[in-house]
Amino acid sequence: MDWRDEYKRKLVPADEALKAVKNGDFVSFTTGRESQSLGYALAGRATELKGVRIHIQTPGLDFGWYDRDPIWEQAFEIKVGYVFPRGVVREWIDERRGDYVPGQIIPFEERKDLRQMDVLLAEVSPPDEHGFCSFGASVWNKKEQIRAARTVIAEVNTNLIRTYGDNFVHVSEIDYFVEYERTAGWGIKPPAPPAESKPIADLVATLVKDGDCVQVGAGSLSESLPSSGVFNNRADLGMHTEMTARGMVRLVREGVINGKRKQINTGKAVATAVGGSREDMAYINMNPQFEVYTSAYVVNPKIICLNDNLFSINNGLMVDLTGQITAEAIGPRMLSGSGGQPAFAWGANMSRGGRYVEVLPATASGGTISRIVPLLPPGTVVTVPRYLADIVVTEYGIAHLKGKTIRERAEALIAIAHPDFRAGLRKDAQRILDM
Amino acid sequence: MEWQEDYKRKLVSADEAVRQIAPGDRVVFQDGPEPERLGRALAARRGQLRDVQVIVPYPTVDFGWYDGPAEGGFAVRALWDSPLLATKKAQRPAFRDAYARSLQVWGPPSGGNDVFVTRVSPPDEHGVCFLGHSVWDKKERATKARLVLAEVDPRMARTYGDSFLHVSEVHHFVEADVSRTLSSTHAYSEAVPEYARKIAAHLRELVADGNTIQLGAGPTCVALPLAGAFEGKSDLGVHTETLVGGLLRLAQQRVITGERKTLHRHRVVAAEVVGTEADLAWAANNPIVELRSLGYVADPAVVAKNDYMLAVNEATAIDLTGQVSALHGGTRNGPAWGTAGFAVGALLARGGRSVFVMPAMRNGVSSVVVNLDPIAEVTVTRTAADLVVTEYGVASLIGKSQRERATELIALAHPDARAELTKQARKLFWP
């Protein structure tokens, strides 16, 4: 059958497509933003459905079902894979009304024995002349999810971009198409860069070398560093990153990032999710300098380490004096998720000449709390273990931790704490670390 | 120069050899039995040498320098606590002085001012000296050191793999005193506790023919092959850090053939061998057993090249979300070196799995805990936790939510601990 006939046959209204969901099914949204029309159509069936398990990797939209209401609770059992600090599930997760699925160092969809999905809700572009749809700005694990799911329903959005890499799915792999127009981006404006952005960018810039292959993790501070000039005056940088932080696309455009010295995907800027301003997106669209691959490839330590001189910058929340880092929780309270951080911490440590940099402001809550602490509060999720902690940077300086003893680490970290907290930390270190 | 001539020129007395050690040097002893003559000669120079740091990973020989504090700028440090140190007041390794190991480095990183002190076999006909049953980090240290001093000891066996130094790579040789017995760094025991039999029975269900096995060296792990964890399996492979006697005997019996290995096929790969005298004799001069550097065998990228890798390690404690603490000997200052590299490498391998085993209770304390002790090392993050086995069953954590993880782990806990764990889990993960 010609793919055009197939597409026409599979094209249905959202309500029609969502009839595929049965009581007790396991339904998943693809990673990244949720398909909006499909989410609303699923929510619309709340009174007729029972015990439908829904996995939302990155909850961004409010479909109503996070509200406290027995109708929602009987129809849907919801699990999320990430919590945004001020997002739609904040209250729901704080009240422990929902469940949280910790991330994995490799996407578990690669392992078919581990999870079988009944219905997958995705978002794609209209098919091209060969019948291939694009995933737009992000691939994540969508290809593996599509292969694993019994039924795949895709929202079709004409505003999605097309990229090079491994960013396509054929019409034959999708069961239902629902046409729905919406903008292409997340619709979330990047938060204003924190005050520490510039001084920290200046410090991290001293660690960057020409030819480094860079990764910049999500988080308001780390994401602001490219725009604050962390890569200025460098040449021949490469990019192998989970997401493109603001300013990274500009560096490709200016030729600072050219990928010349990369060992794999030479000459290409690689990510699993691209983003930025409208101009950035237009620049990436069908631009062969950019390749967007599945996260099983991009966010995989054994691939990451194939590039020499991997320079990885990630956002931390808190670090203890022994070097244990959390980027996702304080005590048992989840504030975000691990994201690609563990994989890049491993990959950078495994890369020849690789360096792993954790950035964090020295204090939080208006300067009342030190983010450098004697020990992490009990129950805190450790995102980066002690033995992968390499370099930590605050606005007060750089702490090199690799190859040091606990005492030497504590001294290096106290030296980059806010001055008001140093004496207290020294006292705590004496008591707790027996210094 | 012919190696014979080179060797003759380099063969000196211990006193002569240690004369090369200069102020500012850091003298690193090999892990394993300390070269005694060199140690004693160095101890005799204690009064003369200023600003010298001596690192003995695991002290078994009393050189007289463990009794008091550092004197005259001659500082001695141990990395691990040992029975010998337990009899001394000073110099016991403190948590503050533990090296927070980094991925490719065990103990202190190698430096340009290092003197490496090791023990090797007499050179063979090619001028090659063997490192015996433990390669560990010796090759890397010898390569990076300013000065390499080696005691020549005919008891150091010839082994296959990357397990040797050429005469040209050593600066001075000293004949070892063979009248002294070689001490062991491993308190190796083949006791099989009852709980280990139950764990072995569960683990056996997870082992498939053709798996490449990594097995830790903790007391539970050592007992598993003896308790039948691999019984009835065929064509297993081994890629491990410490090859323990029980596993080695399965290679002798051809349960382990390496037939399906995708890296070093038909070879048992390890960084060291421990076991009975018969085990060590079998591993020596045996082309099946290849000993390679720790930095190689435990590199996750190397581990991941083994399809169907099955990593089995011992956990000290696991919290309800799946964070794993795995410390050597249960002490808080001894990280288990390769554990993390194997656990993560196995997950990255095609068809690979990682298993943590532990008795549900140790000395009345549950191994499943609500929270880890904040000072404990999180050895494996919950993003890399996979299978957990106690005598009460198997938990599979990949892809599971917090509630599911807590439920599965509580089912593995000791029955006496379950009520309290359940109460705390309700508070943490349910409304």
Image (cartoon, helix red, strand yellow):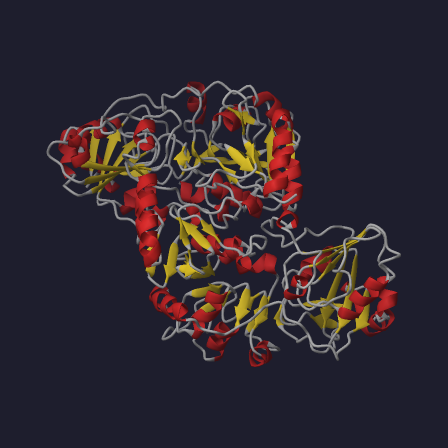
| Residue A51 image position (x, y, % from top left) | 17, 40
For the C terminus of chain A, which image quadrant? top right
| Residue B363 image position (x, y, % from top left) | 45, 61
Q: Nearer the viewer, residue A223 or A53?
A: A53
Left-right relation of A11 to B361 = left
For the N terminus of chain A, which image quadrant? top left
Give the vertical position of A108 relative to B2 (above or below): above
Give the vertical position of A267 relative to A106 (above or below): above
Left-right relation of A171 to A225 = left
Give the vertical position of A427 relative to B143 (above or below): above
Left-right relation of B80 to B193 = right
Q: Is residue A215 visible?
A: no
Left-right relation of B41 to A363 = right
Give the vertical position of A119 relative to B240 (above or below): above
Q: Nearer the viewer, residue A45 or B186?
A: B186
Q: Residue furthest left?
A: A48
Task: Report how many numbered discs are placed on residues in the image.
Answer: 0
Q: Is residue A245 visible?
A: yes
| Residue B107 image position (x, y, % from top left) | 65, 54
Which picture quadrant has residue B130?
bottom right
| Residue A257 image position (x, y, % from top left) | 56, 30
